[in-house]
Image: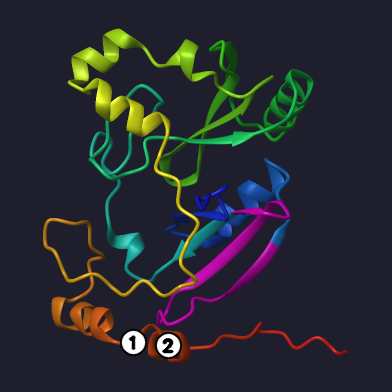
Amino acid sequence: MIKVNGIHHIAIMAADIREHVAFFSDVLGCKLSAIFDMHGVPGGVHAFLHMDDHSYFSIVELPQVKDIPIELGVTHAGTGAAPSAPGTMQHLAFRVDTPEELLAIRDRIRKKGVNVIGPLDHAMCQSIYFAGPDQLTLEVACSDEAINPEAWIDPAVIARLGISDEDLARYKSPDAYAGEGGRVAQPPYDPAKPHQAYPEPMYKAMLAAPDEAITKSAKFEPPVKIAS
């Protein structure tokens, strides 16, 4: 079955990318793996910090970002219990493998002078909570086992949200799909579907272009040539 199988990277916007690189490297121990001019984005800088060989924490800086105000309750939640606008990140939880590692990373964070609350035992995981640059709400969590849907899908919440039995069954067991070798054509533009916020003529031109043309339109290389 074809499905997404993890997070390759999560990209966070920064007013000052140096502050973020310093924080996530020094405080959380994520080594800097890449920092380069953002592909196809004039003035943009893109950084990647290593979590493991499959997952990275990514930071983006664009020239105009420093002029956009942070507004708690709109752009940022500020705590794990507060609201922010639809589509924004309410909080970000990193992972460690054991309760012992959770206490060890808490020690590291506190040793760097950053306040941390917890751990709290959520039964599905244990979590500690703290803040990062630009008012980020951050968490580190560990779980002993995978989340059991039978214990954690609350019938009272399902009823309150108006989710039918048929929909719930579909959400718990998504349709099996093996892919078709990349042969599925771009569907017609449907304004009711989610869309990226490019200028409409540009976006529709990209949707109308053959996939091969999009792929061939840009090919990027590492900024530093390594001698073989």
From this viewpoint, is residue 30 visible?
A: yes
In-front residue for pair 149/182: 182
Rendered location of residue 17, percent (x, y)? 52, 61
User: Does residue 125 sit above or below 38 in this rendering?
Assistant: above
Rendered location of residue 202, percent (x, y)? 21, 83
What residue span does the magenta drawing correspond to?
Answer: 33-56
Which residue is painted at 40% across and 39% down in the image? Answer: 174
Residue at mark 2: 212
In-front residue for pair 160/25: 160
Which residue is painted at 40% across and 82% down in the image? Answer: 42
Res 91 → quadrant: top left
- Cα separation, mark 2 vs mark 1, equals 5 Å
Residue found farthest to the left? 191
- The kind of residue tagged 1 is Pro
Residue at mark 1: 210
Please tell me whether mark 2 sits on a helix, a strand or a loop: helix
From this viewpoint, is residue 78 visible?
A: no
In-front residue for pair 89/74: 89
- Assess whether residue 42 is covered by the magenta stretch: yes
